[in-house]
Structure formats: C-alpha cells, structure tokens
Amino acid sequence: MADKRNVTQATGKRKTAVARIRLLPGGGTITVNRRSFENYFPRDTSRMRILEPLQVTETMSQYDVLAEVHGGGISAQADAVRLGISRALVEIEETMRATLRKNGLLTRDPRAVERKKYGRHKARKRPQYSKR
C-alpha cells in the first residue's frame, strides 16, 4: 500500500449510492469493492462515465483508484464513483477544477426518487377513474 501522506480521499454521491474514493499515485488500476473495475461494472457506458474525469484531465496512468461503493443501483454507483474521482483530483491539484467544471464533472446530480403520496399508487399515478 502507498504511504498515507500520498493518499487523497473524497466522497461522491448519486441518488442513494455513496462512493468513498482513495486516489494514490500508481499505474492507473481501478478497484471497486475489492474487485476489478471491469468485473464490477460490466456495462461499457458505466466504465466510460467513471473514466471520464481521468481522461479529461489526462491523468489516466498517474493514479490508482480504490473505491468502496454501497447503495443504489449500478448506474448510480458509477456516477457516485465518477464524482468522487473528480473531487479527489481537485483536492490533489486545484488547477484541474476549471477543466472538470467545464465538463460538468463536479456537479452532484440532485435528482432522487419522489416520495409516495397518500391516495396515490405511486408518487403521481392516480387510481383508475371509473365513470359508473
């Protein structure tokens, strides 16, 4: 494991998914919940979204990423990891903030599931109308 001083930690959230990210100098390996990145996220779109902050800042092979994710679904977890990586990169080097901000990688997606209301089947779905 790397020296404690070189480890940068950040948190990313999306819906109910929470990702704790540790960024350390290395060769570019990504580990999610002690599994390989490709194994944990089988979809190419999820992998692309996670790699986006590293590609935009051109730091692909400079850092190893250790992520612990829980809650939410696969897509929300991928977005949580993406936000965590972006925040960790800004913590390491403040000059990356403008690039990441321009690409929309530092904004937390505020959308979440709307609560169910009484008298409704779901948040907005009404009971079936009966004329007679």
Image (tube, grey):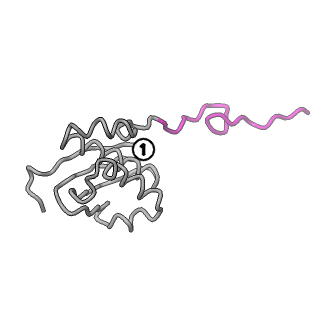
Q: Which residue occupies the extreme right position in the image?
A: 132
Image quarter where the N terminus lies is: bottom left
The image quarter containing residue 95 is: top left
- Is residue 23 part of the magenta span, yes or no? no
Q: Residue at x 37, y 47 (%)?
A: 80
- Magenta stretch: dominant secondary structure: loop
- Is residue 131 part of the magenta span, yes or no? yes
**Nearer the observer, 130 or 33:** 33
What residue would you read off at disc 1? 16
In the drawing, does residue 92 fall left or right of residue 107? left
Q: Amino acid at mark 1?
A: Thr
Image height of 78 relative to 100, above or below: below
Q: Residue at x 62, y 31 (%)?
A: 118
Q: Which residues are magenta?
A: 111-132
Q: Residues within 10 Å of mark 1 (few under 14, many from 20)?
A: some
**Nearer the observer, 125 or 21:** 21
Give SS at disc 1.
loop
Image quarter where the C terminus lies is: top right
Q: Residue 111, percent across and down?
A: 49, 36
The image quarter containing residue 86 is: top left
Q: Residue 47, percent across and down?
A: 41, 58
Q: Residue at x 69, y 37 (%)?
A: 125
Q: Residue 113, percent across and down?
A: 52, 39
Q: Residue 53, percent across and down?
A: 33, 48
Q: Residue at x 43, y 38 (%)?
A: 109
